[in-house]
Image (cartoon, rainbow, N blue to C red):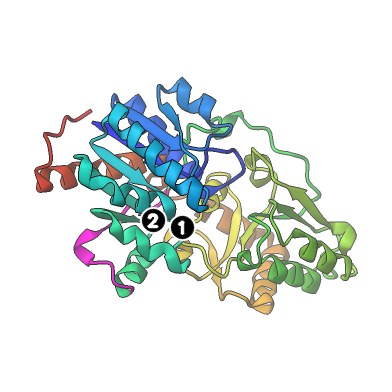
Amino acid sequence: MRVLHILNHVQEIGNGIVNVAVDLACLQAKDGHEVGVASVGGEYEALLANYGVKHFKLDQKRTLINLLNAAFRYREIIQVFEPQIVHTHMMTGVVLARLLKSTSRYALVSTVHNEFQRSSTLMGLADRVIAVSHPVAESMAQRGIPRQKLRVVSNGTLGSVRGRRLQEYLSIELHKPAIVTVAGMYQRKGISELIDAFARIAGDFPSCHLYLVGNGPDRSLFEEQAKNTPFQNRIHFEGFQAEPQLYTLGCDIFVLASHRDPSPLVIPEAREAGCAIVATHVDGIPEALDDGQAGILVPPADSEALASALKQLLGSPDLLQIWKYNAQQNLERLSVLRVHQETMAVYEELTTNCNIFSVVSG
């Protein structure tokens, strides 16, 4: 099968959408398919090339002149690569691929990663719409995407081609007990509530430290908030880390306090590392935590509930060990191989049912 993925970029900056698509493209190529990626480029170009994935330069910046140029460039890519499947992961790409689809014979697939964005309904322009969790699929259906178009392929990142095996990492030395989050520095990631929750319990656990791994536009707000607590010297802003496994392996408790999170990749990584996990009961997080069997779920935007869960874990070494054990159970479904296989099944179902062309299985 000939598959073309469309992305804004392939930069190594911790973007979950890019990470999912790069994993998928590499595994598809490894499985014998002809795979291309169209984007403005980035650090992952070398990894893609190592797997035999072709990269085509495509700049989709949203200015009128640039979009016209992008349309001409996209048409050139389609004529050269002749894809059977075009798989789009972001809004501009699906609009471009749909508008120019009439002159080509490909099937169009989209993946909805951030359904909380109003423009995500545009992903419904595709012939099949992949949702990264069941709550995302339900949300998209309620917003008008026909259910017969929707398929669920839950995110999984274990065994990613972007990193080493977990056993090959050496954990970073952290102050113990260590609480870690890996998240973009955005208000919707609940960083403010996490800092507040830590300030509530830090006095009771004087050796406990909080590590915030990630970058983003709201980082200065969170740094100011941390400075206004009595515990600023125990709250560490670590910035973006290309290998967050060094932190998940070194921590005791992993927290994801998001207000919205369709299907976070960091949850499988924290589970594999054996962290006790506390996360919010929103969107795809419960699904990633086996509906609360693999981690403690708390309400979003509730620093008091978050503080209470942290206090319980820090106050009971036995309970902490139980939740570390629970996190590492039932990991098989969180693998990138499963994501690859289920995505290929969507492609094959679509092309067979639509009778567009003969499917050549890899």
Q: Give the side of residue 142 with respect to residue 62, left or right.
A: left
- Residue 258 in the magenta stretch? The answer is no
Residue at the location (77% across, 64% down)?
A: 222
Please report whichever mark, 2 or 1, sits nearer to the chain's N-terminal start: 2
Is residue 59 visible in the rendered image? The answer is: yes
The total number of labels drawn is 2
Q: Of helix, strand and loop, which one carries label 2?
A: loop
Vertical side of 43 occupied by 70: above or below: below
Identify the residue at horizontal 58%, vertical 66% (top origin).
258
Please provide percent x and percent y for residue 196. 76, 72
Asked whether 90 or 60 is in front, the reply is: 60
Residue name at image x 22 percent, y 59 percent: 149
Q: Which residues are magenta?
A: 143-155
* Spot occupied by residue 93 in the image (x, y as percentages of width and height): 40, 49
Left/right of residue 329 with respect to residue 134 in the rendered view: right
Cα gap from disc 2 to disc 1, whole angstroms: 6 Å
Q: Which quadrant is home to the C terminus?
A: top left
In this view of the protein, can residue 291 be seen by the observer? no
Residue positioned most to the front: 65
The circle on residue 154 is none
* Residue 8 in picture, x, y percent from top left: 49, 45
Q: Amino acid at mark 2?
A: Val
For the residue pair 362 and 206, the one nearer the viewer reads as 362
- 33 or 319: which is nearer to us? 33
Do the residues bearing badges 2 and 1 touch, measured as CB atoms within 8 Å? Answer: yes
Q: Residues within 10 Å of mark 2 (few under 14, many from 20)?
A: many
**Residue 263: which disc?**
1
Q: Amino acid at mark 1?
A: Ser
Q: Give the quarter of the figure containing the N terminus.
A: top left
Image quadrant where residue 191 sits: bottom right
Q: What residue is shown with label 2?
A: 132
Residue 187 vs residue 7: left or right?
A: right
